[in-house]
Image (spheres, rainbow, N blue to C red):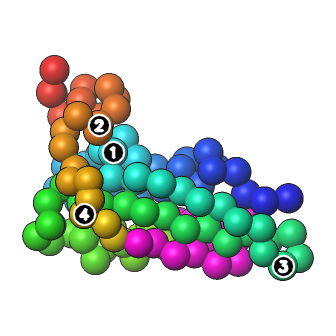
Amino acid sequence: MPVAEDTVREALKQVIDPELFVNIVDLGLIYTVTVEPADNDQSSVSVDMTMTSPACPAGPQLLSQSKEAVTRLEGVCDVEIKLVMEPPWTPDRMTEDARDQLGIF
């Protein structure tokens, strides 16, 4: 049975932006999660994500941690994390939880 998109998003919540101390899902950095069936009831997962700015110094760390978090999921055999910059990230993408953590109203 393929891994559910919600399961992937929950795993990605383990990845915390080291400058803002908020997880990347609540920050709105995850644009799309695609789960495709692979061999032996395994799943291939592709994630399109962005950064808060193109020059984000934590970018490589966030990409690496994202791949690790999804790879650890049971039933996942392949993970691709793609960095995209379109559309550009804006604070409007943040969840209410992230806004509360950062004191943005």
102 vs 67, left or right, is left
The disc label shown at residue 85, or none = 4
Which percent across, then down, holds residue 65?
Answer: 41, 70
| Residue 72 visible in this rendered orientation of the protein | no
Residue kind at label 4, given as amino acid type: Met
Q: Distance between the residues labelled 1 and 4?
A: 13 Å
Residue kind at label 3, given as amino acid type: Asp
**Residue denoted by label 1:** 28
- CB under 8 Å between callouts 4 and 2? no
Task: Let me know if residue 95 is in the magenta part.
Answer: no
Task: Let me know if residue 76 is in the magenta part.
Answer: yes
Residue kind at label 2, given as amino acid type: Met
- Asked if residue 87 is positioned above or below residue 37 in the image, the reply reads above
Q: Distance between the residues labelled 4 and 2?
A: 16 Å
Q: Choose top left, top right, bottom left or bottom right for residue 84.
A: bottom left
Which percent across, then down, holds residue 80?
Answer: 52, 75
The mark nearer the N terminus, 3 or 4, is 3
Between 33 and 74, the residue placed more toward the observer is: 33
Residue kind at label 1, given as amino acid type: Gly
Between 43 and 13, the residue placed more toward the observer is: 43
Disc 2 element = loop
Disc 3 element = helix
Q: Give the farthest residue toward the left.
A: 55
Which mark is in front, 3 or 4? Answer: 4
Residue shown at the point (22%, 50%) measured from the top left? 89
Range of the magenta residues?
69-82
Q: Distance between the residues labelled 3 and 4?
A: 31 Å
Q: Distance between the residues labelled 1 and 2?
A: 5 Å
